[in-house]
Image: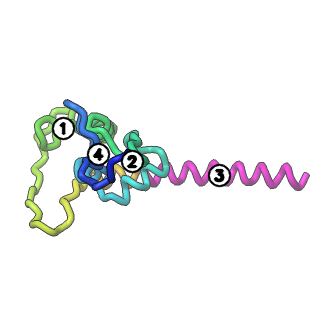
């Protein structure tokens, strides 16, 4: 006889030395809006998700690699927290204000801009390729 499902078991499996984050936690970890993470997932240009029990989850290592890849693409290094340009300029001062409880988590302005740019570029590429394929399809049908 099967035991009743009393929902006492954890919804997410935790692996030793490997953190698994929900999409909301992943967007907070990256410092971007959850809508940007969803758009990147749909456009397949964001961090690689994993699926456990039909839930989309992200590993911390994948998120860290994605974040560092975005920062490295614009010539910025993150060592110990604050950003620093790779070319030897002094570190930028960040205005870190802690958000009060109940507010949305603070977003990282640089990563918000980089993720929005990535989404825009990918959406533009997908739409242009889609129009090209639609045009070829119409051309083949008419001629």
Q: Residue furthest bottom?
A: 102
Query: Which residue lies at the image location 21% right of the left edge and 65% below the top edge?
Result: 104
Residue 135 in magenta stretch: yes
Where disc 3 sits, the SS reads helix
Residue at position x 63%, y 48% in the image: 129
Residue carrying label 4: 12
Ranked by sequence position, the earlier of labels 2 and 3 is 2
Label whose residue precedes the other's in the sequence (3 or 4): 4
Helix, strand or loop for disc 1: strand
Would residue 90 be seen by someone viewing this image from the given angle? yes
Outermost residue toward the top in this view = 17
Q: CA distance from mark 4 to mark 2?
A: 11 Å
Residue designated by label 1: 78
Q: What residue is shown with label 3?
A: 130
Residue range (magenta):
119-143
State which mark lies toward you, 2 or 3: 2
**Front position among marks 1 and 2:** 2
């Amino acid at each position: 006889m099967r035991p009743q499902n009393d929902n006492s078991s954890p919804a997410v499996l935790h692996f030793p030395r490997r953190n698994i984050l929900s999409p909301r936690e992943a967007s907070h970890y990256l410092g971007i809006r959850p809508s940007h993470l969803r758009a990147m997932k749909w456009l397949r240009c964001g961090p690689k998700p994993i699926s456990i029990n039909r839930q989309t989850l992200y590993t911390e290592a994948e998120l860290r690699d994605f974040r560092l890849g975005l920062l490295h693409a614009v010539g910025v290094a993150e060592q110990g927290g604050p950003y620093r340009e790779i070319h030897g300029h002094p570190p930028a001062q960040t205005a870190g204000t802690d958000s009060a409880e109940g507010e949305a988590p603070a977003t990282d302005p640089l990563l918000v801009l980089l993720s929005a740019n990535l989404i825009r570029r990918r959406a533009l590429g997908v739409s242009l390729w889609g129009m090209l394929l639609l045009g070829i399809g119409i051309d083949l049908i008419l001629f």
